[in-house]
């Protein structure tokens, strides 16, 4: 590994609740043969879905600060007063973002979060190429308060997956996820992502190669029910579970449906039943008579995904299907408070403060690498459901940078 990659992120052990849980550590490290954060998390498990040009460093950092340990939204005074006084947006106001102590935002709280976050999906061919590696460095940037953090990768070559997994291990991530669900034509055209649903043997070879290089890191898969029909789910899920992955996230639609049809949550329940048949529950791990040496009790987790808009709706889906947790994608837009236990609903001023903090994070950490246009797309999800929202959104979508966005918000407050 070059010093370039060694400096990008520093590995550290993930502890739930800010301290080592001896019992959990023994179970995860001793019985599983490596550090498996999935076995430490409480259930139901909540995950923030990996999304291209969405779940970048700034987006994940907002969730770590607002939904993580000691969330700033419940602790810091609002950036804008109830009267909407503009002076609170002055350049000298320290409440523009969480205070930094020793280089780490105060929201860190000393340990990992109770939810899982993923990077944007990373191509293994790019990651294993010297020049591509440099270009992808910013997409693999994370902070300690984002743990547990999983790197999601995609491609079609087992050898490249193995090489990429070694890099991810060296970068200190908590897990590796393989994208076998993206339905976009570009990825399908090269036999990657959802195209692997039609190549079950190759899919297994990719998982095996990734696990070989991952060592102690858990390997998971995110996929769909099938390529064109939901009844493809049974054979496809069995094929994946045979590899004894740590977790399987199922988007409850087929590749052909993309996001156009309602999610088929009844299929998630069927997937749970298949998992339970292949891996009978046993609190004491031992070789499974049906699993060819798999550890009963260390069975793969089933995470459901599709059309979930709130934490409460996620809990309802877990109760309905028996899955171990849920992954939320579009329902997370403009809502870094999503994973708070009480389904927290921020006031308008707090929403503005978070939106501008998000924009500042983006500009400060990603501005040299990515267009502010990506951040502008986030503005429309923060600005909805209140008087004048449409007008405010329209103006923010034309903002060239953070300063202009701040001026637009202040102009709104003066009028309303």
Image: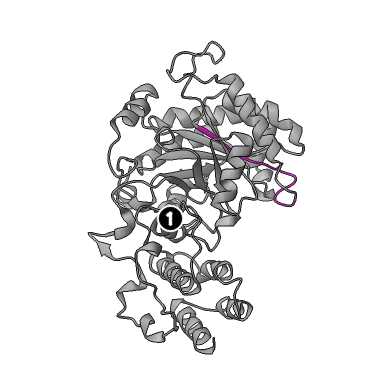
Asked if residue 414 can be seen in this view, the reply is yes
The residue identified by callout 1 is 67
Q: Which is nearer the eye, 400 or 290?
A: 290
State the image quarter where residue 29 is shown.
Answer: top left
Q: Residues within 10 Å of mark 1 (few under 14, many from 20)?
A: many
Give the percent coordinates (x, y) of residue 169. Answer: 38, 38
251 drawn magenta: yes
Quick check: 192 left or right of 229? Answer: left
Quick check: 109 left or right of 332? Answer: left
385 drawn magenta: no
Q: Residue at x 40, y 64 (%)?
A: 73
Which span of residues is magenta-colored? 247-260
Asked if residue 164 can be seen in this view, the reply is no
Give the percent coordinates (x, y) of residue 397. Answer: 58, 75
Q: Residue at x 49, y 79 (%)?
A: 405
Relative height, residue 231 to residue 129 (above, below)? above
Element carrying mark 1: helix
Q: Residue at x 40, y 55 (%)?
A: 64
Q: Which is nearer the eye, 259 or 334?
A: 334
Q: Residue at x 65, y 36 (%)?
A: 268
**Residue pushed farthest front?**
342
Relative height, residue 272 to residue 60 (above, below)? above
Give the percent coordinates (x, y) of residue 416. Answer: 54, 86
Q: Which is nearer the eye, 411 or 125?
A: 411
Relative height, residue 135 to residue 128 (above, below)? below
Q: Which is nearer the eye, 222 or 132?
A: 222
Quick check: 196 left or right of 215? Answer: right
Give the percent coordinates (x, y) of residue 13. Answer: 30, 40
């Amino acid at each position: 590994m070059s010093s370039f990659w060694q400096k990008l992120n520093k590995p550290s052990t993930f502890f739930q609740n800010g301290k080592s849980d001896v019992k959990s550590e023994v179970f995860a490290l001793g019985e599983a043969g490596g550090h498996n954060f999935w076995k430490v998390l409480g259930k139901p498990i909540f995950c923030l879905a990996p999304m291209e040009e969405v779940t970048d460093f700034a987006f994940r950092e907002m969730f770590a600060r607002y939904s993580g340990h000691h969330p700033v939204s419940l602790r810091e005074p609002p950036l804008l007063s109830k009267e909407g006084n503009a002076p609170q947006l002055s350049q000298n106001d320290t409440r523009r973002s969480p205070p930094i102590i020793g280089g780490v935002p105060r929201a860190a709280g000393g340990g990992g979060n109770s939810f899982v976050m993923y990077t944007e999906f990373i191509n293994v061919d790019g990651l294993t190429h010297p020049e591509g590696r440099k270009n992808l460095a910013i997409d693999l940037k994370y902070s300690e308060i984002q743990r547990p953090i999983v790197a999601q990768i995609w491609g079609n070559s087992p050898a490249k997956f193995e090489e990429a997994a070694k890099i991810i291990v060296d970068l200190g991530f908590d897990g590796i996820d393989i994208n076998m669900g993206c339905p976009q034509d570009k990825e399908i055209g090269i036999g990657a992502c959802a195209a692997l649903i039609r190549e079950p043997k190759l899919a297994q070879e990719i998982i095996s190669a990734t696990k070989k290089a991952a060592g102690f890191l858990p390997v998971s898969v995110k996929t769909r029910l099938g390529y064109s029909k939901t009844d493809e789910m049974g054979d496809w899920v069995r094929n994946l579970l045979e590899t004894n992955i740590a977790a399987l996230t199922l988007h409850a639609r087929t590749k052909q449906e993309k996001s156009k049809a309602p999610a088929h949550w009844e299929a998630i329940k069927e997937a749970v039943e298949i998992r339970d048949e292949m891996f009978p529950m046993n609190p004491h791990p031992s070789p499974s008579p049906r699993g060819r040496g798999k550890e009963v009790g260390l069975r793969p987790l089933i995470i459901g995904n599709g059309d979930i808009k709130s934490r409460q709706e996620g809990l309802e889906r877990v109760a309905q299907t028996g899955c171990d947790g849920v992954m939320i994608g579009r329902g997370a837009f403009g809502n870094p408070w999503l994973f708070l236990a009480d389904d927290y609903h921020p006031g308008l001023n707090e929403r503005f403060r978070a939106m501008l903090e998000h924009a500042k994070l983006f500009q400060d950490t990603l501005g040299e690498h990515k267009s502010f246009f990506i951040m502008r797309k986030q503005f429309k999800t923060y600005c909805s459901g209140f008087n004048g929202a449409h007008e405010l959104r329209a103006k923010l979508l034309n903002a060239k940078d953070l300063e202009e966005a701040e001026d637009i918000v202040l102009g709104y407050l003066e009028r309303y």
